[in-house]
Amino acid sequence: MSDTNNKDTNNKNTNQEDYEKVCYICRRPESKAGKMITMPGTNMCICNDCMQKAFDQMSTSGFPYNNMMTMVPPANMNLDDMMNQIPQRQRVKKKSPKKAEAVFDIKSIPAPHKINAQLNEFIVGQDYAKKVISVGVYNHYKRIAAGNTDDIEIEKSNMLMIGPTGSGKTYLVRTLAKLLDVPLAIADATSLTEAGYIGDDIESVVTKLLAAAGNDVEKAERGIIFIDEIDKLAKKRNTTNRDVSGESVQQGLLKLLEGAEVEVPVGANSKNAMVPLETVNTKNILFICGGAFPDLEEIIKERLNKKSSMGFQADLKDKYDNDKNILRQVQIEDLRAFGMIPEFIGRLPIIFTLDALDKDMLVKVLKEPRNAILKQYQKLLALDEVDLRFDDDALEAIAEKALKKNTGARALRAIIEDFMLDIMYEIPKDDSIGRVTITREYIENTGGPRIEMRG
């Protein structure tokens, strides 16, 4: 029993040594506040600045030690327990000593075709988008691995992803980060505002990445930040009010995209909170921005019609009305007309689009990926020893319903949850059921599923 307690104590001490000491008064870590003074017989640490302030107040106060008593807890309180009350999410890991060799080994970075092959196991279609993002990520991490070994400095390859809702923008980035085993932060641009106004500061996107990296600054500086709904930051038109959540946020993001050292709070979104502040360099952080950009199609059509509506061989003005993948022809001038400032677009050199999902792609999304929705339900019923199957006509009926909702792959889950509710509720009642086959008639509410008994 004593050996077990000793092991727990050793593990606890080892974990404590991995984190920086934090001042009990101002909550600054040792890397910011300097050498800490440890109170005798306790784990409570106080920085030199706070200790000096306490002594200054003691010398000027009419009642000595009055201010010092606010700093020292009662005698019946365990000081070690008080120090352990600092939340884990607000503790800062110590930085490892600088090494001469590069952080990344170039040979360990997967080649673009290998990254693309791994993405194919989880994502159906979007071949062009997967090819572009595979090459962009590969070059980005090669840039980190190479470092500044000569006079040639490789610039960052930040990306802008444009695609209709439900086409898989967020899922693509999340899958990519999991395959590369790098920290990922997903931020929503709609909540960002200019500093000083209600909402999240621009630096909050870096705070989320630091939290995803376990407050390890070096690990966070090699991560990926995905800013969704970036189209909501477009310049507001016909307004005389200050644009605190549009163009101002684009201006504030410029320094992060380019690469700068920013101070971010640890474990909180506001710098005013009594939490430690850490300095994070965004030079090697890959930024991927994504958005649906509604009405961008109309801007593209207007540009194309201007170029093709003159002369004897002019095209018809409705030529592009039925083109579902008109976003493929997007150019920088279209994004500027949409409301994105040139400086912001210039820091996102890689621009690519995702296609809208048609019926065939939706059917593939249902059954082909490694964690497809149908496979998830088949596994759930397999735990009840029931074989779940879907007719091909049933899959087409589900895809047709999803197309009518016009929300892409997101509609599939809602449709399947609806018609699978009764099956998931009734099947566990009868142990004699061995197989359930979902039919088109059941999807269209004109019939029921085929149920086969065991034996």
Image (cartoon, rainbow, N blue to C red):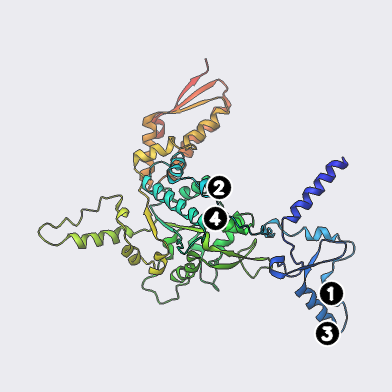
Q: Are marks 1 and 4 in contact (CB under 8 Å)?
A: no
Percent from the top left, x then y, of residue 132?
39, 50
Circle 4: element type: loop
Numbered tag placed on residue 60 in the rendering = 3
Give the crowd class for mark 2: few <14, some 14-19, many >=20 residues within 10 Å.
few
Gap between marks 2 and 3 measured at Cα: 55 Å
- Relative height, residue 358 to residue 221 (above, below): above
Say which of marks 3 and 4 sits in front: 4
As helix, strand or loop, the secondary structure at mark 2 comes to loop
The residue positioned 77% from the left and 57% from the top of the image is: 84
Question: Which one is closest to the eye, mark 1 or mark 4?
Answer: 4
| Residue corresponding to mark 2 | 181
Q: Which residue is mark 4?
A: 223
**Among the two numbered marks 2 and 3 on one chain, the one whose residue lies closer to the N terminus:** 3
Q: Amino acid at mark 2?
A: Asp
Q: Give the foreground label among 1 and 2.
A: 2
Q: Which mark is residue 68?
A: 1
